[in-house]
Image: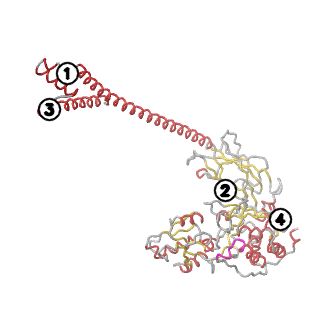
Amino acid sequence: MMSSMMIVIFSTLCMAVFAVIAVVWWTRKALGIPRSGPLGRIAQWAEGVRTSEAEVRTATVGDLVLFVTLYVVGVTLVITLYTWQAGSAMDKYKQESEQLRQTVNTLQSEIISGQRDLADLKEQQAAPQLIVPGADEEIIGEHVDLHWQYGNHNETTDYVLQLMRIAGFTGDNDTQKVAHLSAPTLTDLRPGVPCIVAATDSADQQSRAALGPGTYMWRVAVGALNGPAVDSKHCANDDRVREWSEYRTFRVYPSMQERLESTKELLAGTRFEQDIPFSRVGPDGKPTGFDMDFLKIIVEHCLVLQKDGAIHYNRDECNNEVSALKDGEPLEDLEQGTPGHLRLRIVPMPAGVNWLEKLQSRHIDLYIGSVTRAKKREYGGVTFTNGYLNYSSEAIFRTSEACSSIDCLAQKRGKVGVVESTTNAWLADELKKRIANLNVVTYKSFPALESAFEREEVAVVITDGVMASTMGLNETKRLAGKALPGWKSYLVDHIGYPEEQFAIAVVKDTQSKNDAAANQLLTQLNCAINDHPAQTLIAILSHKYQLDKLGTSYAAPTLGSECKSIPSSAGN
């Protein structure tokens, strides 16, 4: 195609050259201009060819050579141009071909890598993956819910479980601890003897087992049970070769009190949020913040675990430790490991994990972390201590925002941001009931909400006043929660208390023999929170974390009659 085009161009160029020569010759002849120079003589020679032989002699051989040379030079130039263009096109074609080849090779490599990854995933999913209980998780009660995931699961897939008791509660032959349990199925498993049973709910990849106190290993495999149960524990004589999951261990305790007797630890859940002063991870990787320090002092220096497993508040020891802290002694230097004192273990709650459900299932003993006490949250055995900090919800606007009310913002179709599953979200719901076209956007965490506000994704945020003060935004204007529509309904129907307060969420020990034992942790925490040492501690920590500048306050100490102090030696 390119060759034909170049021939046409060359022919046209030659015709144009001869046409120009002809025009010049005709013009000279018509005007009588004398012919001179080589081209003139060539023209004269051409005319002589037409008229007579005598005229031919006027053109010399040199003139003819010049004409031929010019013709050859023109042809050479055209051929050179064509060759250069063809070479450039060929180079470009080779370059594009090489790039295309490299792209294809890269895609092929990615496909091969993806196929290998897929094969690895399929190989990993050849056996089920254990989900719940977590590794070394501590469970309160007589029932354990086991959950797993299998990559090739469908509604007809069957599963079997293998459980093995590897240690008893206080000894391998301990049976007294399970005397009060209601018809347990696997409570008398002998240590070291595996038991294979069919899953109770294969369709949902989960199973429930009634287990006695002790430490257990478990795993799961695909397939129906091969053989009937051979004993009263419903264990089967199943010798089929299976693709088992990995092993995982967990511990079962009949009650929170008996777990405390065994471990001497209180499990406290919290959600670490960086850049807020309540609970976060410090530079050394350890929990820090107002709530973390406050709870550590209360649990490890103010509560005593007696020999009978009962928890008591010791005012004298609490006061001694707080006084030392007030005198400037670092928190890290306070006496640790005092006989009879509890230890605090912090259990982080990742984003997306419902802390209230973890508390209700007794996976933790309490939850702290700038959480508002609310009647709406008090169910499933969960209740709140007395509040230790008062605060108020606020709506935060930018100074540049023309609107100063939620009604105005709704008319402009502006967005209101809140953190999901918080009391602030409850307040936003009350606003939506009363303000048409209000657009409320929820976020997973306070940092996510703060970031959205900084990027101007939302025009207003509703949050706790102490949180708003940590956002680092200078140009803001605030509207108190009490000035928002629906405030009274929010306070009465959701909060259920006269004011908003941060408190500690505690779960009752429902396996205890009486109400006093079931509520002892709540009672003794309230004793500590309401007494003078704790109030002094709150003041110290508020100053340390600058909460005294964020509009917080705390109630006057009121030590009730049930909060009688016990001597330090009582826990020994």
Residue type at numbered disc 1:
Ala
Within 10 Å of disc 2 (Cα), the crowding (few <14, some 14-19, many 20+) is few
Q: Position of residue 207 (x, y in %)?
A: 65, 53
Q: Residues within 10 Å of mark 1 (few under 14, many from 20)?
A: some
User: Mark 1 or 2 closer to N-term?
Assistant: 1
Question: Position of 484 compared to 278: left or right?
Answer: left
Residue named by callout 2: 145
Residue 346 position within the rendered picture, expressed as x and y whole percent measured from the top left: 72, 62
Q: CA distance from mark 3 to mark 2?
A: 117 Å
Residue 338, placed above or below residue 229: below
Q: Which residues are magenta?
A: 543-550
Q: Do the residues under discs 1 and 2 have CB atoms within 8 angstroms?
A: no
Asked if disc 4 and disc 2 are in contact, CB closer than 8 Å, the reply is: no
Which residue does the numbered mark 1 point to in the structure image? 59
Identify which amino acid the numbered label 4 is placed on: Gln
Q: Closer to the camera, 437 or 245? A: 437
Tag 2: amino acid: Asp
Report helix, strand or loop for mark 2.
Answer: strand
The image position of residue 322, as x and y in percent, is 80, 74
> In which quadrant of the rendered view does residue 271 lie?
bottom right
Q: Give the spatial CA distance, label 1 vs label 3.
A: 18 Å
Mark 4 in CB contact with mark 3 (< 8 angstroms):
no
* Mark 3 lies on residue: 33
